[in-house]
Amino acid sequence: MSKVAGVYHRVVDPQFVEREYNNRALVPEHPAFFARWEKDSEFVRSSLRGHLDVPYGDDARHRVDIFPADDARGLLVFIHGGYWRSLDKSMFSWLAASWVAAGVSIALPNYRLAPSVAIDAIVADAIAAANFLVRKGPKYGVAADRIVVSGHSAGGHLAAALLAAPLARLQFDAARIIGAVPVSGVFDFEPLLQFSYNADLRLTPDSARALNLYDKQPTIAAPLVIAAGAEESSEFQRQSRLLAERWKPQVKELQILPGLIAAIADKRILSDIVATVESIRPHAGEFEVVLGIAPATTGNEASQLMNMLFGNCSLQPEVELVDVAFPPGYEKAFPGPRFGIDGIRVASGVESGPLTCTALKPQGSSAAELAALARTFALAGIDVIKDDHGIANQPFCPFAARVPAVQHAIADANRETGGRTIYAPTLSGGGRSLSEQARIAKESAVKMALIAPMLVGIPTFVEIQVDLDIPVMAHPAFAGAGRIAPPLLLGKLFRLFGADATIFPNHGGRFSFNRATCMAIAQAARAPWEHVLPALPVPAGGMTVERVDEMIEGYGPDTMLLIGGGLLSARSKLLDRAREFVAKVRGRIR
C-alpha cells in the first residue's frame, strides 16, 4: 500500500437521498436545458431523414424514432432518462444529427412510465424495443448487426439492464450487441426506497433488490464504458463506480466527465497526487468508501493529514471517518508516544498490572483546596492524580498557583508513604499560554500532563508534548464534535500524534459508548504498530469501585482505571474509599 487509505461510512437517510438523487433540485436551471433540447430536437426532426413514432408494441408509448445513416457502421440505441416517470424520446432527437453525420444510425425508443407500470415492466419495454429493432430494422434502413446500447439516468439503467437480460427473452443473437455506454445510471435501487419519487416508482425492498444490477452479472458479453459527470452528486458517481467495479473485466473504462479533474493537464498530478476511490461497498445500511490519498498531500504534518482525511468531507453530515490505514514507514513523520505504557510505569513505579487514577474537582475550588484533596489521594496510594479537564487557568484557581501547590502536596504525601504518585495538570489555551504553563510544570517537577488535543488543536498538541518531555495524557473533550469513529480518533490518531495515555468514556457509565467501541479504542491504543509505542488506555466517566473487577477483566493489565466522582462522593470517608480503590486494583492483579 502506497497511499493513506481513509475509510468512511456514509449514512443513507431520506434527507441524504433527496439531496443526492433529486436532479431537478440539484440543477435548478434544468428548464432551460429542457427547452434547448426540445428546440434543437424539433429542428433535427424537421431537417433529418427519419422514421418517427414507429410502433414496436401495443401501448401508445411503445414507439421508437429511427434515424438511418447512409452506409452505416452500426446502430446506436439511446434510451432517454426521466426517472422512469417522465420525459420523452422526442426531447433527444438532437443526438441524431452528429451520429448520423458520423455514419452511425440511431434509434430512440420510448417506454411506458411509472406510476402506470412498474420498473420491471419498463425493462421489458427496453427488451421489446431491442427485439423489434433487430427484427424490423432493415425495413427502416438500419442494419442491426452491430448495436451499441446507451442511455442516461433511467436510460443508463435500462441500457445496462439489457446486458443483464435473460438470453431467453432476446429474439436475436446476443452477439449483435457489441457495446454499451450507461451514463449516470442507477444500478443500486435501495436508496430510492427513501426517495420522494418512490410515490410514483412504488419500489419495495423486494422489488428494489430484484432490480439491482451491481450484484448481478451481465448475460451479454459486450464491453462497457460507464460514465458519470464530475459535477453530479456523489451518489450518481457512486452508482457508476459500483457497477464498474462489480462488472469487471467487462467494463473497459469508467469515465467521470469533465469537472475539476478534467482541468488538470499534468499527468504527474493526475497519477501521483489526485486522490482515488479505491472501493465502495454496501455496509449495514450505509456505504463503506475507501479513498486513496497520496501521502505527499498530507505534508507529513498533523493538521494537513486531518485536512486531507476529513476536511471538506466533515461538512457532509452523513459521512463518518471510521478508519485510516497508513503506508509502511509513514508513521515515522509523527512523534507517537515518547514514553508509552512502559514510560508511564517507570514514572509511577508501577511495574505491572493496571494503574489507578483519579481527578481533582470540582471547578470553583481554590488551589489550596485542590492541593489538600490531592494529598488525600496520594496518601491513599493513587498512582496518577489529574486535574479535572474543566480546571484550567480560571481566576479562582490560576495555573501558576495551583500546579506548584498540588505538586508540593503530592510530593509531601509521597515522602510520608514512600509512594510515587504523580500529578497530571491540565494544560490549555493558545500557544503563549501553553508555553508558560509548560515552563511552570517543569519548574514544579510535574511528571505528567493532561491535554485535550481537540481543544488546543492537534498540531499544537504534537508540538507541546514534544516540548514537555514528560508523558502526556490525552483528554477526549470536543472529540465528539466531529464524526470520526472513537477507536480511530481516541485510539489510533491520538496515539500517532503523541499521546502516551488516552482517556475515553467507559461503557456503562454516563456516556453512550458501548462495550465494543471501548474495547476497540483500547485495541487501537495498544496494538503493535511499526515504530509507534503503545499508549495506555484510560477508561473513565461515571465509574465506581464496584466495577473494578469487570474493567480489569475487560481491559487487562495494561490499563489505567480512572474513578473521579465515584471516590469524591464518599466525602468524609474519601481516604478510606480511595484506599479501597487502590487495594482492589492491586489485590486483583499485583
Image (spheres, helix red, strand yellow):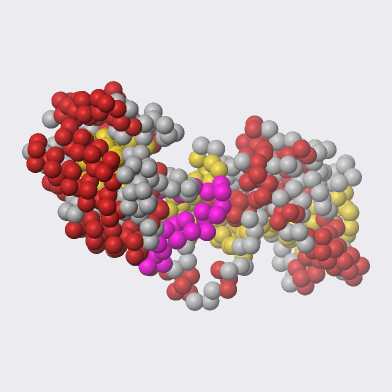
The answer to which of 60 and 138 lies nearer the viewer is 60
Q: Which residues are magenta?
A: 297-324
Q: Is 65 within the magenta? A: no
* Residue 423 x %, y %: 22, 46
The answer to which of 88 and 579 lies nearer the viewer is 579
**Residue 408 sits above or below residue 103 on the image:** above
Q: Quadrant of the C terminus?
A: top left
* Residue 298 x %, y %: 39, 65
**Residue 267 sits above or below residue 406 on the image:** below
The residue at the point 87 percent across, 66 percent down is 39
The answer to which of 185 and 6 lies nearer the viewer is 6
Going by the image, does 550 lie left or right of 5? left
Going by the image, does 216 lie left or right of 526? right
The residue at the point 75 percent across, 54 percent down is 24
Q: Is residue 142 visible?
A: no
Q: Is residue 198 visible?
A: yes
The residue at the point 24 percent across, 58 percent down is 440
* Residue 482 x %, y %: 48, 49
Going by the image, does 480 lie left or right of 63? left
